[in-house]
Amino acid sequence: MVIFLTIIHIVICLFLIIVVLLQSGKAADLAGAFGGMGSQTAFGPRGSATVLSKATTVAAALFVITSMTLTILGSRSVGGGSTVLETEGSQATEPAPAPVTPSPVTPGGAPAAGQPSVTVTNPATGESKTVPLDIPPASGQPAEGQPATKTPNN
């Protein structure tokens, strides 16, 4: 149904463009260029309605009808959209994953004292495992436990 109405709408659009372009202007004479009107009527001389003007009126009415019909059918087929605020609100209510917290290292095969580590917990089994972090020292800074050395400037 929507495809059929879209095709009809496009045909009406093309017909309306052609009919409007074929019409001659109402003030196409020399007096119209300088603001003169052929008679004393408020909106200029009014001739009898031609076939092109009647076709323009009918095509414009059909254009409006098909436009509104396509809009109504299109909004019904979407199925009730949601706003940005509703979308953001639903994402904000989801529970956040548990953060990984560093814990002290236990002796017996554990990382050396003072070395940073992280305890990782498997949510499925509940097992915890301490993993040492291998963090290199910042450039120009000595590693922890190492003396600061100076290099001679040349």
Image (cartoon, helix red, strand yellow):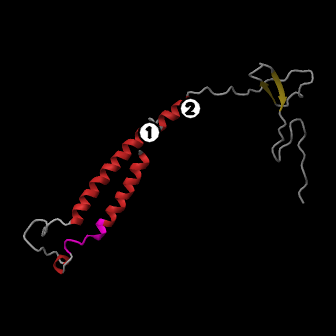
Q: Residue 91, which numbered label?
A: 2
Few, some or many residues within 10 Å of mark 2 (<14, 14–19, 20+): few
Q: Is residue 131 left or right of residue 66?
A: right
Identified at 86% across, 36% down, the residue is 144
Identify whether 77 is placed above or below 13.
Answer: above
Find the magenta span and give its range: 19-27
- The residue most toward the top is 126
Residue shown at 82% from the left, 47% from the top: 139
Q: Where does residue 21 sit, x and y in percent of width and height?
A: 31, 69
Q: Residue at x 32, y 54 (%)?
A: 63
Type of the residue with mark 2: Gln
Mark 1, other Cα within 10 Å: few <14 / some 14–19 / many ≥20: few
Residue 118 image offset from top left, x and y in percent: 79, 28
Q: Quadrant of residue 24?
A: bottom left
Q: Residue furthest left?
A: 40
Q: Is residue 42 left or right of residue 117?
A: left
Query: Label 1 belongs to which residue?
Result: 77
Q: Amino acid at mark 1?
A: Ser
Mark 1 / mark 2, whichever is N-terminal: 1
Quadrant of the drawing holding the C terminus: bottom right
